[in-house]
Image (cartoon, rainbow, N blue to C red):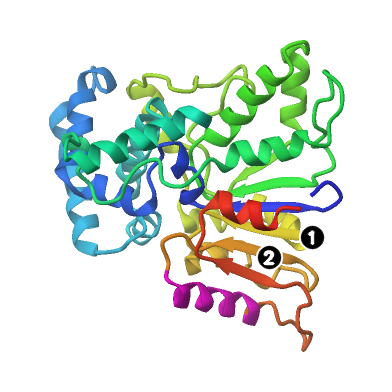
Amino acid sequence: MKDKKTVFVLGAGASCPYGYPSGARLRERICLSPGFWQSYNISYEIVNPLVQKESRLEEIQKFQNAFSKSKIKSVDLFMANNPTLAPIGKYIIAFEIFQAERQSYFGEEAKLKQEEMADEQRRGIRGPLNLLSSPLFMGQDWYSYLYNRILEVLVGKEALPHFSNNNLTFITFNYDRSLEQFFYEALRYSFTEVTEERVVQCLKQLKISHVYGQIASLKWQNQDDYVDYSFQVDETVLQKAANNIRTIYEEKENPELIEAQNLLQQADEIFFVGFGYAQENMEVLGLPGVISPNCLVYGTAFNMIDEEARRIKATIDHGRKTQGRYHKGPTNIESVDCLMLLRKYLN
């Protein structure tokens, strides 16, 4: 990894080990009453003290009803197909992310929470908000594994990582800030003898590109306009976060995509982590055509059967054929979680 240009392409599954919803769970929470609707009603007086309740709830119910009956799996694709419903859809997503953020954990705490929830499920004592079929805290802690692999090459108490060469970059389809918060906490407390200013300078060299936007900046990213991690949001923050979210077809018009495509083109290895390989998400980055012939490609196919993983691999391989040249770099798509993929292939 040290001498290679490594690009991680993150889907919703990448944040699942830390308490964030998968695409399937997000759809369930939006469409079912023991999910978004119940959480929102509980939080309403905090979130919306100055907003007329009836009009807001009417908008939410209209979105829920249409999304549920559409049977479209992806809320992003649904919003792209229904632009008049997109503003309230973004509002709902922003609320869900902030809710997950307040209940998220990293490292050993995330593992303990996962074990507690599994035990509750076995004993049949799950609460009403946890009765959805898709569990929280799915998969193992790959953030910590990657971070410790980065530290392996460092020597000395002030040997902060160097990210300025773009040898490690992230392209994420997620709106959440868990990866940024994890790296900030990990570096801040790994190097207590180093000033926070130097840690922030180090972090700002790490390229994390949010393809569809990010709900808000953290303080280390923008001291003039930020929302603290795990913040109890109000209506102003929630609406601003919703405005930061973009849909697929809005993003196609964004010139920042060119930079993401260039990163993929120059990569020596690409890891698709927690990614669903939806055609619209592949196309927005020009995948798989932008992948160079010698690039090594690895990807998770968590909860997919082997035949589905093979079809994804075949699609990527077919798309990598350019001008009659067959790619030399292998494509490995496997039915494993994010951590196992890195343990097998991150050198």
Q: Is residue 330 left or right of residue 234?
A: right
- Percent across and percent down for residue 278 are 47, 65
Q: Quadrant of residue 317?
A: bottom right
Residue 11 makes an appearance in the image: yes
Question: Which is the main secondary structure of the residues drawn in magenta?
Answer: helix
In the rendered structure, which amino acid carries the disc numbered 1? Asp
How far apart in space, not on screen, are marks 2 and 1 (Cα)?
A: 9 Å
The mark nearer the N terminus, 2 or 1, is 1
Secondary structure, mark 1, is loop
**Residue 306 falls inside the magenta stretch:** yes
User: Quick check: 51 above or below 92?
Assistant: above
Nearer the observer, 27 or 18:
18
Nearer the observer, 220 or 196:
196
User: Quick check: 315 above or below 235?
Assistant: below
Residue 10 makes an appearance in the image: no
| Residue extent of the magenta highlight | 305-318
**Residue 277 falls inside the magenta stretch:** no
Residue that numbered label 2 is attached to: 297
What residue appears at the point 80 percent right and 53 percent down from the top-left corner? 5
- Label at residue 268: 1
In the rendered structure, which amino acid carries the disc numbered 2? Val
What residue appears at the point 74 percent right and 65 percent down from the top-left corner? 296
Q: Quadrant of residue 304?
A: bottom left
- Percent across and percent down for residue 292 are 77, 69
User: Quick check: 74 above or below 240?
Assistant: below
